[in-house]
Image (spheres, rainbow, N blue to C red):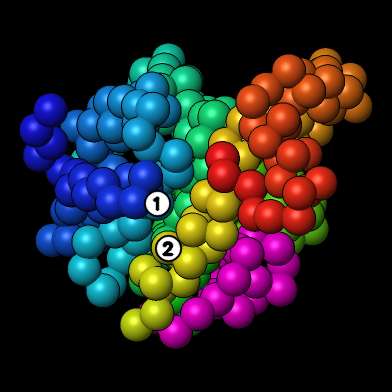
């Protein structure tokens, strides 16, 4: 389909999604969120796509928050529905997707933008990136999973500091706290993202999906992550990838997944 706020480019089994609203610092409005739902739903269903990279257009921002004008007059229930719909249709969709999703963070990742990056499985930041959850300055708190995912990634103390102050942190500080996997010079960001994804693509796609499900289970209430791991481990034995991987190991060659 044709997107108004996204640019899509597929190459070498990787779909790159670029949020293309640079004049608005790629802020997430309702239309962009709807397009993200459509793009990720299609990517996860496409057999020719094995991984996704998401980034922002222009040098200034990955995503500098949500479009505040859209919810300035919302009621309590409208606010709850905004968050609930965002969780279901975009942020949880990405986190629970069966294919690796990497956020290439160029510039500002604030509010909903940082929440979008945290919903991805991996994050690489340009060295000039700035990350934060400034919702308290609007009399709000993060509503797209920010309080939960930041706590999981950076720990309770850092999450409380960032959310309660609303202050931004540097890419290097984000790396030290575990919020991002790697920091690279801005000019090398896209190449670094493709290199990491390329490394993952040499491995089994079935194993990647199983690993995502098992690791996500560690953070879900009422789910025994160990039991999820046991089940996913067992399921791997019934896949063609397992047979190829073991054969390649025994034959001392690289596997062809």
**What stretch of residues is rendered in magenta?**
164-186
Check contact, mark 2 vs mark 1: CB within 8 A: yes
Queried whether the magenta region covers residue 144, the answer comes back as: no
Can you give x and y, in whole percent of width and height, for residue 215 in the image?
A: 75, 36
Residue 194: mark in rendering:
2
Q: Give the foreground label among 2 and 1.
A: 2
- Picture residue at 40% right of the left edge, 51% below the top: 53
Number of marks drawn:
2
- Picture residue at 71% right of the left edge, 46% below the top: 248
- Picture residue at 67% right of the left edge, 36% below the top: 244
The answer to whether one can see residue 67 in this image is no
Residue nearest the observer in this picture, 237 or 194: 237
**Which residue is the site of mark 1?**
53
Mark 2, secondary structure of its residue = helix
Vertical side of 216 occupied by 116: above or below: below
Can you give x and y, in whole percent of width and height, for residue 133 in the image?
A: 51, 55
Residue 203: mark in rendering:
none
Label 2 neighbour load within 10 Å: few <14, some 14-19, many 20+: some
Q: Earlier in the sequence, mark 2 or mark 1?
A: 1
Which of the image's four quarters has the C terminus? top right
Vertical side of 160 occupied by 139: above or below: above
Mark 1, secondary structure of its residue = strand
Q: On the picture, is 245 further left or further right than 87?
A: right
Can you give x and y, in whole percent of width and height, for residue 90 in the image?
A: 41, 30
The answer to whether one can see residue 49 in this image is yes
Residue nearest the observer in this picture, 225 or 119: 225
Label 1 neighbour load within 10 Å: few <14, some 14-19, many 20+: many
Vertical side of 233 occupied by 56: above or below: below
Between the residue at mark 2 and the residue at mark 1, the CA separation in whole angstroms equals 8 Å
């Amino acid at each position: 389909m044709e997107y108004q706020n996204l640019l899509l480019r597929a190459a070498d089994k990787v779909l790159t999604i670029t949020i293309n609203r640079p004049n608005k610092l790629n802020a997430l409005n309702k239309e962009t969120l709807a397009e993200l739902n459509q793009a990720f739903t299609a990517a996860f269903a496409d057999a020719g796509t094995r991984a996704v990279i998401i980034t922002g257009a222009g040098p200034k921002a990955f995503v500098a928050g949500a479009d505040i004008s859209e919810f300035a007059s919302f009621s309590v229930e409208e606010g709850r529905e905004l968050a609930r719909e965002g969780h279901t249709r975009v942020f949880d969709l990405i986190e629970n997707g069966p294919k690796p999703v990497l956020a290439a963070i160029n510039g500002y990742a604030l509010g909903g933008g940082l929440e979008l990056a945290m919903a991805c499985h991996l994050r690489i930041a340009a060295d000039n990136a700035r990350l934060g959850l400034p919702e308290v300055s609007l009399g709000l708190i993060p509503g797209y999973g920010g309080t939960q995912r930041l706590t999981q990634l950076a720990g309770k103390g850092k999450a409380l500091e960032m959310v309660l102050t609303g202050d931004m942190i540097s890419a290097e500080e984000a790396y030290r706290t575990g919020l991002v996997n790697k920091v690279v010079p801005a000019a090398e960001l896209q190449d670094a993202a493709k290199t990491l994804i390329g490394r993952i693509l040499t491995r089994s796609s079935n194993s990647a999906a199983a690993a995502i499900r098992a690791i996500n289970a560690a953070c879900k209430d009422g789910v025994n992550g160990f039991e999820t791991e046991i089940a996913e481990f067992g399921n791997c034995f019934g896949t063609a990838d397992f047979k190829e991987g073991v054969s390649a190991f025994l034959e001392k060659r690289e596997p062809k997944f």
